């Protein structure tokens, strides 16, 4: 029925993006050419041609794939743990208060401060994954808890009138109700994961975009800095886009 | 016409199965006793609302009670207390000698509330099958199909709630309430969103379900006609704080049909109760 309107929407949506980004890029190019912001903002064309040079291209890709895998694993671990812990509070309510406090506490500690601690405990190699996981954990945890809070009171009535066990209530009623919130949380978590991974790489990881950014800053390689930053942004963007697509396609099919 | 006939035939099958269940001897002692039941809601800033004030009522096992009264008089609150969803501030409620919460644990209650409360991610079929899953029982596939047919939605088995009209959702909700063959059926304006014709059809079905397996039923309705048609006793609640202003036994012969509604006896009861309802509404203190 509405199949016909779908591509139109999609095209107009894509067009908006192209136009928006195009304008931004043109502005950037001009600003770079005219050196409005000095050397810190080179023209886009010089960044691109730098990134396309075989040597830097290979370096960038290798680093990006390491960061991507750190972010992805961190994302998976963080979201599964966040989801599982939020659910366990639902099954055993006394735990809920403690979990709330703990997670707020964990979130209040800046990741930067946790870095050295993680180096000592999980090692330099795994630190980026751990920081990514921590960054995602909180987002997902809070999102799922928020989802549980939005279970409509009529559904609570159903749970109570059928004398449903905590576990079945979670599986059949509470978790499905929290699903849209979970996906929202994952969407936000996608960029947190990339950010977390890059941050983790600053603490002496052997390779990755974070390492590249630190060394580019120290050696004032502006083109390299911008290329790495671009790749990081693109990564979060892709993650966000994939989850947004999931949200748009999956949720309506599930009745939302 | 043909499809209606089909429904009726399928219905007969459904009902005779229920009959067997009854003969198997679970003719229950599902009487409900309400004793001095009150409900006071505490609002913020120390304000209170007395929703229900002192209700005494003995409902025999298998009896059909209709509850009528002006909007906001505490009908839903009373039902929620019987269903164990609210605790009375005073007095007590016993169902077959047990508290509502004990009955809940044994899946004795079937409830369709004013808001349908269907799961948006489940099809009509799965929504009706939900009580089985919630109770950890194997889903009785035949029963789910029979219930779908009973509420006239067998063509919509796979439809999601958002694809159903308001009345259809209510019908699914009634079917869900019946799924586990409850001993007590609690219905809060289940036909509110139905047109007059479907409503009469549903009333007929409800009467048949009930007469083949007398289930203690409390039905809240805004239609006096519906109340008289279905009930053994009609309870009229006065405006908030609600108490029983009138309990009218309906002695019309069963099964009741469209012809019953034409009889003088029916008309008299209808007129009497309508007048009584008007009177309680008028005498309400301005709020
Ligand atoms: N959870 C609650 N907290 C506070 N007040 C409540 C609550 N539930 C109901 N009330 C109040 O109790 C009174 C009775 O409400 P109730 O829902 O029982 O009315 P009702 O007779 O079912 O009305 P209607 O016919 O419109 O459904 C109302 O004044 C309402 O505001
Ligand atoms: Mg009500």
Image: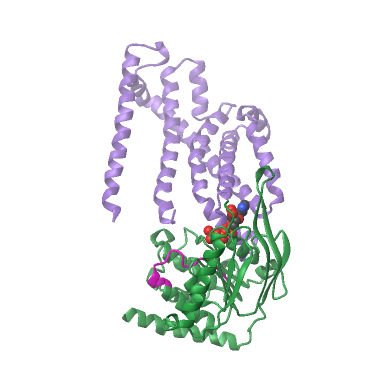
In the rendered structure, the answer to whether residue A109 lies left or right of residue A129 reads right
Q: Position of residue B84 (x, y in %)?
A: 66, 64
Q: Position of residue B36 (x, y in %)?
A: 72, 66
Q: Is residue B142 visible?
A: no
In the rendered structure, the answer to whether residue B141 lies left or right of residue B158 reads right
Q: Is residue A10 visible?
A: yes
The part of the image, by quadrant, that contains residue B26 is bottom right
Residue bounds of the magenta highlight: B186-199
Which chain has been coloured green in this picture? B
Relative vertical location of residue A142 with respect to residue A50 in this rendering, above or below: below
Relative vertical location of residue B216 with respect to residue A118 in this rendering, above or below: below
The part of the image, by quadrant, that contains residue A114 is top right
Q: Position of residue B272 (x, y in %)?
A: 52, 73
Relative vertical location of residue A239 with respect to residue A113 in this rendering, above or below: below
If the picture is divided into quarters, which one holds ligand 1?
Answer: bottom right
Which chain has been coloured purple in this picture? A
**Quadrant where the N terminus of chain B is found in the figure:** bottom left
Colour setting = by chain
State how many labels appear.
0
- Kindly identify the residue that appears in the image at 32 percent across and 14 percent down: A33
- Kindly identify the residue that appears in the image at 33 percent across and 29 percent down: A21
Relative vertical location of residue A81 with respect to residue B82 in this rendering, above or below: above
Q: Position of residue B27 (x, y in %)?
A: 63, 84
Residue A120 in magenta? no
> Closest to the observer: B265 or A69?
B265
> Closest to the observer: A150 or B252?
B252
- Kindly identify the residue that appears in the image at 41 percent across and 19 percent down: A223
């Amino acid at each position: 029925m509405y199949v016909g309107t779908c591509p139109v929407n999609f095209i107009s949506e894509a067009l908006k993006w192209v136009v928006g980004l195009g304008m931004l890029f043109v502005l950037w190019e001009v600003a770079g050419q005219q050196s409005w912001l000095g050397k810190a903002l080179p023209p886009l064309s010089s960044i691109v041609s730098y990134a396309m040079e075989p040597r830097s291209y290979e370096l960038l890709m290798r680093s990006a794939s390491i960061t991507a895998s750190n972010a992805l694993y961190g994302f998976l671990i963080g979201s599964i743990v966040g989801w599982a812990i939020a659910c366990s509070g639902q099954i055993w309510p006394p735990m809920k208060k403690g979990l709330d406090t703990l997670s707020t506490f964990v979130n209040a500690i800046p990741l930067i401060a946790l870095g050295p601690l993680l180096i000592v405990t999980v090692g330099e190699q795994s630190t980026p994954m751990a920081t990514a996981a921590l960054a995602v954990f909180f987002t997902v945890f809070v999102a799922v808890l928020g989802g549980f809070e939005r279970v409509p009171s009529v559904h609570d009535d159903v749970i109570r009138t059928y004398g449903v066990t905590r576990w079945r209530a979670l599986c059949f009623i509470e978790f499905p109700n929290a699903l849209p919130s979970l996906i929202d949380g994952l969407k936000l978590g996608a960029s947190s994961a990339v950010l977390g991974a890059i941050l983790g790489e600053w603490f002496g990881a052997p390779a990755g975009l974070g390492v590249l950014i630190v060394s580019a800053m120290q050696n004032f390689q502006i083109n390299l800095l911008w290329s790495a930053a671009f790749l990081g942004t693109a990564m979060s963007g892709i993650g966000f886009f994939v989850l947004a697509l999931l949200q748009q396609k999956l949720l309506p099919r599930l009745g939302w | 016409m043909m499809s209606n006939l089909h429904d009726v035939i399928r219905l007969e099958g459904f009902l005779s199965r229920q009959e067997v269940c009854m003969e198997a001897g679970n003719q229950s002692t599902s009487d409900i006793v309400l004793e001095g039941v009150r409900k006071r809601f505490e609002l913020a800033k120390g304000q209170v609302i007395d929703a229900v004030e002192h209700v005494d009522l003995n409902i025999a096992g298998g009896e059909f009670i209709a509850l009528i009264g002006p909007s906001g008089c505490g009908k839903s609150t009373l039902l929620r207390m019987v269903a164990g969803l609210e605790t009375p501030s005073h007095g007590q409620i016993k169902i077959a000698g047990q508290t509502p919460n004990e009955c809940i644990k044994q899946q004795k209650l079937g409830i369709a509330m004013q808001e349908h409360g269907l799961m948006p991610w489940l099809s009509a079929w799965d929504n009706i099958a939900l009580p089985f899953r919630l109770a950890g029982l194997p889903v009785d596939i035949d029963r789910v199909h029979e219930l779908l047919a009973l509420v006239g939605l067998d063509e919509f088995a796979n439809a999601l709630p958002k694809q159903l009209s308001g009345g259809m959702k209510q019908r699914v909700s009634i079917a869900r309430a019946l799924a586990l063959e409850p001993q007590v059926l609690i219905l809060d304006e289940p036909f509110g969103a139905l047109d007059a014709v479907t409503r009469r059809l549903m009333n007929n079905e409800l009467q048949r379900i009930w007469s083949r397996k007398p289930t203690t039923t409390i039905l809240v309705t805004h239609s006096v006609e519906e109340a008289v048609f279905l009930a053994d006793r009609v309870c009229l609640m006065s405006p908030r704080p609600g108490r029983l202003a009138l309990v009218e036994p309906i002695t019309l012969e069963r099964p009741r049909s469209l012809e019953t509604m034409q009889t003088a006896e029916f008309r008299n009861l209808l007129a009497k109760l309508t007048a009584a309802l008007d009177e309680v509404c008028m005498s309400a203190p301005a709020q």
